[in-house]
Image (tube, grey):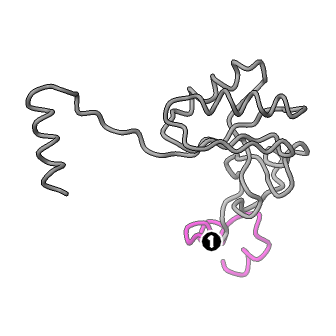
Amino acid sequence: MGLVDFLSDYVSYRFGSRKNKRRKPNQTVEIMVKMDCDGCERRIKNAVSSIKGVKSVEVNRKQSKVTVIGYAEPSKVLKRVQSTGKKAEFWPYVPYNLVAYPYVAQAYDKKAPAGYVKNVTQALSVAEAPDERLIMMFSDENPHACSIM
């Protein structure tokens, strides 16, 4: 099978019958869309599934989430969803257990689905880092700093 593929690619490249294109990587695109009824859900699903390279489309109306799996570019998928007349944006949430401190002011969102928080950079540093422990050892904020000095 490898020899046949090699010869096919060589002949097509050599004689120009088709251009040698790199295939886009398979990826998952998650988009947040406000959906009210079955008609909205169906319209979005039909619009996205018609994009070239899309393998599957999952619509979750309860979470206002559309998951697209395939070889399509995320920007094209977002534009196609927006062309249905709905306000759409990339999925801004991550699972609750992946965040070190989920109740930072920017991360906590009342509109987020259950088990999710916003994907923001964490302001708090990890105290287990070796350089952080050395800095805190002689800090004015550390009440035990006098005992070390």
Magenta residue check for 86:
no
86 left or right of 37? left
* Residue 40 drawn at (x, y percent): 82, 29
29 left or right of 43? left
Q: What residue is pinned by disc 1?
A: 133
Q: Residue at x 56, y 72 (%)?
A: 130
Q: Dot 1: few (<14), some (14–19), or many (≥20) neighbours within 10 Å?
A: few
Determine which quarter of the picture holds residue 98.
bottom right
Determine which quarter of the picture holds residue 49.
top right
- Pick whichever, 73 or 51, lies toward us: 51
Q: Quadrant of the C terminus?
A: bottom right
48 left or right of 112? left
> Residue extending furthest bottom?
147
* Residue 104 drawn at (x, y percent): 81, 52
* Residue 6 drawn at (x, y percent): 14, 48
Image height check: is 3 above or below 45?
below
Specify the amino acid type for callout 1. Answer: Arg
Image height check: is 120 above or below 82?
below
> For the image shown, how many numbered marks are present on the structure?
1
Q: Residue at x 48, y 39 (%)?
A: 71
Q: Identify the magenta region.
A: 128-149
Q: In which quarter of the image is the N terminus?
A: bottom left
Magenta residue check for 144:
yes
- Pick whichever, 7 or 22, lies toward us: 7
* Residue 133 drawn at (x, y percent): 62, 71
Q: Residue at x 64, y 23 (%)?
A: 80
Query: Which secondary structure, mark 1?
Result: helix
Image height check: is 116 above or below 41?
below
